[in-house]
Image (tube, helix red, strand yellow):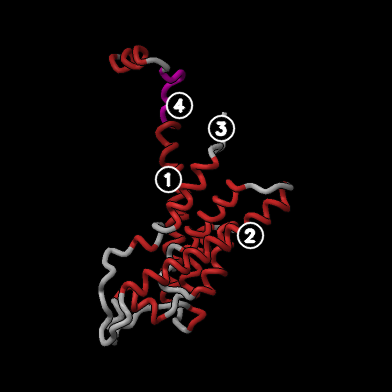
Amino acid sequence: MTMRGHNATLVVLGTFLLWFGFNPGSFDKILVAQPNTADQGNWTGVGRTAVTTTLAGSTAGIVTLFGRRLLVGHWDALDVCNGLLGGFVAITSGCSVVEPWAAIVCGPNWMADVELGVYIFTGLFAKEEFVIQAYDSGVSGVVRPYGLLLGGGWGRIGAQMIELLVIVGWGLISPAMEATPTLLMQRTVDTPPRFYGEYMRMQNQ
């Protein structure tokens, strides 16, 4: 019998704890200034990450709130928390390299497919300036692929599509690999052992 999460207080508390550490806390160094500037540094990326994460999560939470109200006829705080977490996950890949408006677009799409937000949206909306800030601390002269819709070509989104195909392929293959020993055992043993003593008798034969 499955038991749904039923302690709403702890669910909401856990959601808020994740909110402020989910993505902004991923930077290993904050006080790193960018070259030729005194007011730009890794802290800029941290602030942008906090903004985009909040916008994506909030938008996803609001859409989930009213969507569930229309579907089931009542308000549900636990579903809103799930929506918030889905928005956080959807923006994770691009939280430091997209504009705030792109985060609003990305957040609610977790309901269609989280991978769509994690992989596709970054490849579409990553901004060149932000990509260089996030990966190279703003060093000038560095060329990196960025969002397709912002003129960055197919480099970034192509790499992410390959990654998505690999993950889907592994997800399809791994269950078959896990099931193979069981199938082989069913072919060779009419009645599989249920107790330790039966298993030891089989080993001694």
Dot 2 or dot 4: first in sequence order is 2
* Residue 74 coordinates in the image, percent (x, y): 71, 47
Disc 3 residue type? Thr
Residue 10's place in the image compared with 197, above or below, is below
Q: Residues within 10 Å of mark 4 (few under 14, many from 20)?
A: few
Which structural element holds mark 1?
Answer: helix
Q: Tag 3 or tag 4, which sits nearer the N-term?
A: 3
Question: Where is residue 50 shown, x and y percent of the image?
Answer: 43, 66
| Left or right of residue 71: residue 122 | left
Q: Are marks 2 and 4 in contact (CB under 8 Å)?
A: no
Amino acid type of the residue that numbered disc 1 sits on in the rendered structure = Ser
What amino acid is at disc 2? Answer: Val
> Picture coordinates of residue 169 (x, y %)?
45, 54
Sequence-first tag of 1 and 4: 1
Q: What residue is drawn where x is 25% and y is 74%?
A: 32
Asked whether, in this view, residue 115 is left or right of residue 27, the answer is right
Mark 3 vs mark 2, CA separation in Å: 27 Å
Measure how far apart labels 2 and 4 are at the Cα level.
Answer: 48 Å
15 displayed left or right of 108: left
In magenta, the rendered stretch is: 184-193
Which label number is shown at residue 2?
3
The residue labelled by disc 4 is: 186
Based on the picture, tell me whether residue 185 belongs to the magenta stretch. Answer: yes
Q: Crowdedness of circle 1 by 10 Å Cα count: few (<14), some, many (20+)? A: few
> What residue is at 37 percent from the left and 13 percent from the top?
198
Q: Secondary structure at mark 2?
A: helix
Q: Secondary structure at mark 4?
A: helix
Q: What quarter of the picture does the C terminus occupy?
A: top left
Identify the residue under disc 1.
174
